[in-house]
Image: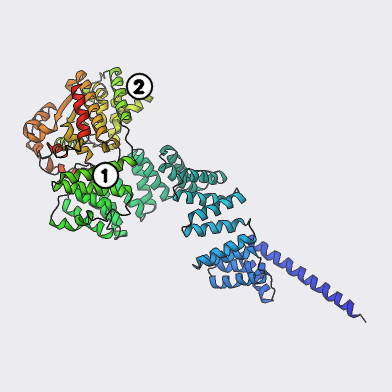
């Protein structure tokens, strides 16, 4: 018969064996769990719990499985049991944080993550998860700190680098965000989202070519990534590669037909390039998808203005500010249209004392221009001038002007034109090409409307293909002419034509090169009273290019440079360049238009006197004026703004004396 002490030894031996067997089974379950064999692992955990096995890992791991199945209350229950069994179990606190976060118990989740970190300061996932939680709460500095700790603890933690990049991007820390994205890409070259986001911030930093490269790489990694095609379209648009930009936008909408952001951006792009029919189609589709989207009504209003449907445009714009009462751009668009008594409500809002509160600089610019326009119509020129100056001064804070770059370019191209050889190829090979050049707001849109009354004319509008062709010729000067390069680009844009007009106004810098190298060409130089011209430029809110337009002094400098450079070209190519004085045109339209048509060797038609009846698309700032019969109302307007214009007056007076 065994003694009592020996029996105790046997019991302990059996218990030790059972505990060891249980631990082996627990380890097996954990291994199955880590291998993704969830159902098998879950069965083991349930059996352990049913048998009364009080192992905190079992309860915690089973809680994570229940969490993944969406059984949040049960998951919380089992995870809290794990913590009760082991109050120092950091993993369980982290898991509980995940569960509580998905239950919307944000404060409790944060406390749980922080407890996990306190117990285990090098707990990488707890730092990462806390970072995600803090970011979603808007606690960006704390979130940044959590992400940075996670990346320090685990330098190859791809998600932490990526999320840190996103956070930094949203804070405007673009250079730091760039470093984080590049790190994520280095660790995982196939991470499409990181390529996309890096391309996005490079675009915001103005590094467009790099942005294009990374965005194209995104598409290589994921050919069905609609957002990538949208971003690529934006980049190509900024690079003025309009054909490829259009293709990218279109692809984004094809991949994701109800992609509202892409549809609205694409419709705005189409409006800007003059494809109003498609632009309207896409905009109306956006409105169908989201009838409460103010931006869609704003764009529709702008499209209808370009089509000359001013009353319908106003209805759409009023709908936009009904949905979004502080929509600054819409107030600006409304200010361009003729006013009536029905407009008093929105105009009162526009001039209300507190209206500008909490507006961004860009929004303030729209509002000051809108106020100036309304005051101008009411002949309150003193207050109009004050608002005009505020608008342009704000624009200069965003886009400092660099007139010397444009002036130097004029000088360089004058030298290049003197070196250019005269193209002796037969003029009959090419259709007649008419280049309308000069300063903005010099009557060029009116001239284009007059000429396009001729059914044989295809207006290319403001398209910079001459400069593109010239740059290509510089790269490959042998075996091809400027005319051949140019006409190939024309054919890419338009199918049929006998006569074309190109209204890229800054082609005045290329006038000598055009005259010497473009067969069968005519150049129409539009000009007007310099002070009326400068005022009109200053009163126009150009949203792209033309940065000098916000400075009266720089406007005067560019005006004088343009005038002087054209004088030089006229000395050598007088027969190729026609002087069109806008002031004479609107004062005596019949005589001036007859003279112009005669110069072009066209047959006369009375319709040339009625350009306001032209149904063509107009997307320039002159859209409202060009829909009205020719009149001389704009002559001498500068006299109402004489004090404002004094800096320009001084510069022009000085130039005339020299």
**Along the viewing direction, whichever of 371 and 242 lies nearer the viewer:** 371
Q: For the N terminus, which image quadrant?
A: bottom right
Q: Position of residue 511 (x, y in %)?
A: 24, 25
Residue depth check, mark 2 versus mark 1: number of the one nearer the observer: 1
The relative height of residue 365 versus residue 599 in the rendered view (above or below) is below
Residue at which label 2 appears: 479
The relative height of residue 635 versus residue 35 in the rendered view (above or below) is above
Residue at which label 1 appears: 391
Give the distance between the C-alpha atoms of the residues marked 2 and 1, in whole angstroms.
50 Å
Task: Bin the neighbour count of mark 2 within 10 Å (Cα to Cα): few under 14, some 14-19, many 20 and up.
Answer: few
Q: Which mark is residue 86?
A: none
**Along the viewing direction, whichever of 519 and 371 lies nearer the viewer:** 371
Where disc 2 sits, the SS reads loop
Q: Is residue 518 left or right of residue 624?
A: right
Q: Position of residue 616 (x, y in %)?
A: 18, 42
Quadrant in the rendering for residue 8? bottom right
**Along the viewing direction, whichever of 516 and 415 lies nearer the viewer:** 415
Where disc 1 sits, the SS reads helix
Q: Residue furthest bottom?
A: 1
Q: Position of residue 347 (x, y in %)?
A: 19, 55
């Amino acid at each position: 018969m065994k003694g009592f002490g020996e029996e105790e030894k046997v019991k302990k031996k059996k218990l030790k064996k059972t505990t060891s067997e249980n631990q082996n089974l627990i380890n097996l379950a954990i291994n199955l769990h880590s291998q993704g064999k969830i159902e098998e692992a879950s069965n083991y955990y349930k059996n352990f719990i049913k048998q009364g096995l009080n192992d905190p890992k079992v309860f915690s791991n089973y809680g994570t499985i229940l969490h993944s199945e969406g059984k949040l209350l049960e998951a919380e229950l089992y995870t809290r049991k794990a913590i009760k069994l082991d109050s120092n179990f950091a993993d369980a606190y982290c898991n509980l944080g995940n569960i509580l976060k998905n239950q919307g118990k944000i404060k409790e989740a944060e406390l749980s993550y922080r407890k996990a970190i306190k117990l285990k300061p090098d707990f990488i996932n707890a730092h990462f998860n806390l970072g995600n939680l803090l970011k979603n709460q808007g606690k960006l500095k704390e979130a940044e700190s959590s992400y940075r700790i996670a990346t320090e603890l685990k330098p190859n933690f791809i998600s932490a680098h990526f999320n840190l990049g996103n956070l930094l991007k949203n804070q405007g820390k673009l250079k730091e965000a760039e470093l984080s994205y590049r790190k994520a890409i280095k660790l995982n070259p196939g991470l499409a989202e990181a390529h996309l986001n890096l391309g996005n911030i490079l675009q915001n930093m103005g590094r467009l070519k790099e942005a294009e490269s990374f965005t194209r790489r995104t598409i290589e990694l994921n050919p069905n990534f609609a957002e990538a095609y949208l971003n690529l379209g934006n980049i190509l648009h900024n690079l003025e590669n309009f054909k490829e930009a259009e293709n990218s936008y279109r692809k984004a909408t094809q991949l994701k037909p109800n992609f509202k952001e892409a549809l609205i951006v694409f419709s705005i792009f189409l409006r800007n390039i003059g494809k109003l029919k498609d632009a309207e189609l896409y905009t109306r589709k956006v409105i169908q998808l989201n009838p409460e989207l103010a931006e869609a009504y704003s764009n529709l209003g702008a499209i209808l203005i370009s089509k000359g449907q001013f009353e319908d445009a106003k209805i759409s714009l009023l709908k936009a500010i009904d949905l979004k009462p502080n929509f600054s751009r819409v107030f600006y668009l409304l200010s361009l249209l003729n006013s009536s008594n029905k407009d008093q409500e929105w105009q009162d809002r526009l001039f209300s004392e507190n209206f500008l509160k909490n507006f961004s600089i860009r929004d303030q610019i729209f509002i000051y221009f809108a106020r100036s326009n309304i005051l101008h119509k009411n002949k309150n020129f003193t207050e109009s001038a004050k608002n005009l100056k505020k608008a342009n001064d704000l624009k200069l804070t965003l886009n400092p002007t660099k007139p010397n770059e444009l002036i130097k370019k004029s000088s360089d191209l004058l030298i290049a034109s003197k070196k250019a050889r005269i193209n002796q190829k037969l003029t009959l090979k090419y259709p007649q090409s008419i280049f309308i050049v000069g300063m903005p707001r010099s009557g060029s849109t009116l001239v284009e409307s007059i000429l396009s009354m001729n059914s044989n004319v295809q207006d290319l509008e403001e398209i910079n293909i001459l400069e593109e062709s010239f740059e290509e010729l510089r790269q490959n000067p042998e075996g091809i002419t400027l005319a051949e390069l140019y006409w190939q680009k024309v054919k890419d844009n338009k199918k049929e034509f006998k006569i074309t007009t190109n209204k890229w106004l800054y082609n005045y810098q290329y006038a000598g090169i055009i005259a010497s190298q473009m067969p069968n060409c005519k150049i129409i130089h539009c000009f007007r009273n310099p002070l009326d011209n400068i005022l009109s430029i200053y009163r126009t809110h150009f949203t792209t290019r033309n940065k000098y337009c916000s400075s009266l002094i720089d406007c005067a400098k560019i005006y004088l440079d343009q005038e002087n450079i054209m004088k030089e070209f006229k000395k050598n190519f007088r027969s190729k360049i026609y002087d069109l004085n806008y002031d004479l045109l609107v004062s005596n339209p019949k005589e001036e238009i007859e003279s112009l048509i005669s110069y072009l060797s066209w047959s006369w038609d009375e319709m040339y006197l009625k350009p306001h009846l032209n149904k063509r698309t107009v997307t320039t700032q002159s859209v409202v004026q060009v829909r009205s019969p020719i009149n001389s109302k704009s002559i001498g307007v500068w006299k109402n703004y004489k004090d404002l214009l004094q800096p320009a007056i001084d510069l022009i007076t000085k130039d005339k004396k020299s």
